[in-house]
Image (tube, rainbow, N blue to C red):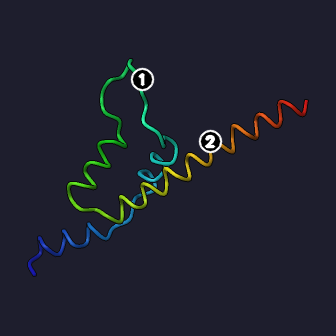
Amino acid sequence: MNLEQENKAKRKLKSLTIEEWLTFFLFPIKSRNQLFPTKSFNDLEEKRFEKFGFEKKRKQANEAKFFGILFYINLILGIIVLVNKY
C-alpha cells in the first residue's frame, strides 16, 4: 500500500472536528431562505462525505443533526413552559 492509499484510508476513518459537528448541531435543517439561494455549508459537506466515502463522518453528521433537532425542540418547549408559568 503506497502513501496515497494509506492517507485515503486514514481520512475515511477520521471523525468530525468540533467545528464541523457544531455546524451540523446548530443548523440541523435545511434553510429555505430565498435571500441567500446558495447551498448551505451542511449540504456541501454531506455531498463531499458521500463522494469520498466518509461513512464515519456522514454517520456523525446525522447524529449531530438529530441531537440539534432535539435541542431546539427542548428549547422551544422550555420557553413555552416558562411563559405559561408567569
Residue at point 13%, 73% (across, down): 5
Q: Is residue 82 left or right of residue 72?
A: right
- Looking at the rendering, in which quadrant would you find the C terminus? top right
Among all residues in the image, which is located at the extreme top?
A: 35
Residue denoted by label 2: 72
Taking the view exactly as shown, the residue that stands out farthest to the left is: 2
Q: Residue at x 28, y 55 (%)?
A: 49
Amino acid type for the residue under numbered disc 2: Tyr
Q: Quadrant of residue 72?
A: top right
- SS label for mark 2: helix
**Which secondary structure lies at badge 1?**
loop
- Seen in the image, is 28 located left or right of residue 83? left
- The residue lying furthest to the bottom in this view is 1
Classify mark 2: residues with Cα within 10 Å, few (<14), some (14-19) or many (20+): some
- Which residue is rendered at x = 36% and y = 58% of the image? 58
In the rendering, which numbered label is found on residue 33?
Answer: 1
Residue at point 36%, 22% (across, down): 36
Image x and y of residue 52, in percent: 21, 58
Quadrant placement of the N terminus: bottom left
Q: Is residue 5 above or below residue 70?
A: below
- Residue type at tag 1: Asn
Category of crowding for the residue at label 1, using alpha-carbon neighbours closer than 10 angstroms: few (below 14), some (14–19), many (at least 20):
few
Occupied quadrant, residue 75: top right
Q: Residue 13's x, y, as percent? A: 31, 71
> Marks 2 and 1, how far apart in space?
19 Å
Whether pointer 2 and pointer 1 mark residues with C-beta atoms closer than 8 Å, the reply is no
Drawn side of residue 19 relative to residue 86, left or right: left
Please give left or right for residue 49 compared with residue 19 in the image.
left
Q: Work out whether mark 2 precedes mark 1 in sequence or the reverse, and give the earlier one.
A: 1
